[in-house]
Amino acid sequence: MVPSTETFFSNIDFYNLDMHLTDDQKAIRQRVRDYLEVDVMPHINPYWEKAEFPYDMAMKMKDLGIMGGLLGEHGAAGLDPVEFGLVAYELSKADGSIGTFYGVHSGLAMGSIGLLGDEEQKACWLPDMVTLDKIGAFGLTEPEVGSNAARVKTTARKDGDSYILNGAKRWIGNASMSNLLIIWARDEDSGQFGGYVIENASETEGVTLSDIWGKISKRAVLNVDIKLDNVRVPKANKLAYATSFKDAAKVLRNGRYSAGWTAAGTASGAFELALKYTKEREQFGKPIASYQLIQQKLVEMVTEITLMQTLNFQMARLLERDELSEGMVSMAKYNNARKARYVTRLARECLGGNGIVIDNHIARLMLDTEAVYTYEGTNEINLLLIGRELTGINALT
């Protein structure tokens, strides 16, 4: 795969953080960059505009050696924390929908099975997920339960060699095309919080999947409303080591970690496109990048991005040392999601009227930050998680 001579991104690294990367880390990042330059950026806008998932485009990710993220068994990539972050960062520079498909399948779904499944479950499902022969989805959020995720209303009732699931889920990415849909529910008898894997959900009796239309953010990935009406799941499909919300939180921590990198990547993509545009666009006889007001916007953007990048690299070091607390990962998500909104708006301003046209990509990235600001815990929830760790006082209840 050879990128075209006309590249979209300049890959700005103002503080030379590349000096800390190994050759292997750079190689993985370059594979992702080449894929984005050739297969995603030239083709993604029509899919985003039509709210249509670019299936063939997404399937090409199986050749990048990134599926499974941090997992390192049954063919999964076994990325280190920096590589895992760089993949999320690069994918999101180009498109939030592609990044979300990867994050849901590789991070949340594969992560649930890899962290909470037994050996038999992992051997059964993970190899086909690595090759994208089976696509995963992660069903936690509900129509009436978002931030208070530990209080899901979906129930599971044991019935012989099966469990019967009843309830509803909302905003579930990948669900309508999933082969493995993980539903989080509370056991009616024991009260335990568990994960139940529905295979081929679209063909399963009692499962109703409805794509959510009218989104303004991450339009090219499909989010789904799910209704579960006496859905029978084999006992063998209950994740063996998921018994409480703390177990699900292990998966969510990695998702929040990824979201910190995602937000920074989206901001970086918008900035690099704006920088290129302002150096080429002429008004009053010279490039608009030569004007002080435009340079102020560019400096504001690159400063915030550099701060996000350095925060992420330290977060990766802490994760590698198993010293990353909930408050720390929440701080990266809280800061970067907030700043990504600011940076992408400045980038859009640099393009003037052309900034609202998706052909120039920035409007798409700007709107995609709205989803990042909300998922993996709203920014308000992440703020309070930091506050709880800082003060020892829980303001959530």
Image (tube, grey):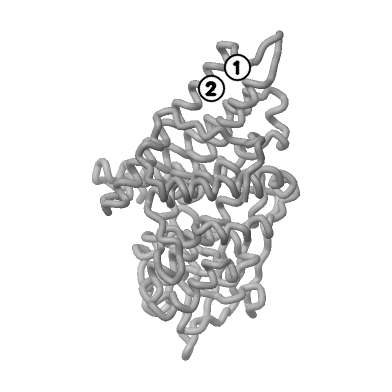
Question: Closest to the observer: 246 or 230?
Answer: 246
Question: Closest to the observer: 237 or 66?
Answer: 66
Tell me if label 2 and label 1 are in contact, CB under 8 Å.
Answer: yes
Q: Nearer the viewer, mark 2 or mark 1?
A: 1
The percent coordinates of residue 263 (x first, y second) are 49, 41
> Which quadrant would residue 111 be assigned to in this image?
bottom left
Question: Closest to the observer: 36 or 108?
Answer: 36
User: Residue at the left extreme?
Assistant: 392
> Which quadrant would residue 73 be assigned to in this image?
bottom left
Q: Is residue 100 above or below residue 384?
A: below
The percent coordinates of residue 80 (x first, y second) are 37, 54
The percent coordinates of residue 33 (x first, y second) are 55, 45
The residue at 65%/70% (across/down) is 208
The residue at 65%/15% (across/down) is 287
Quickly name the residue at label 2.
Answer: 298
Quickly name the residue at label 1.
Answer: 289
Q: Amino acid at mark 1?
A: Ala
Check disc 1: other Cα within 10 Å, few if <14, some if 14-19, many if 20+: many
Side of 394 relative to 180 (left or right)? left
The answer to whether one can see residue 395 in this image is no
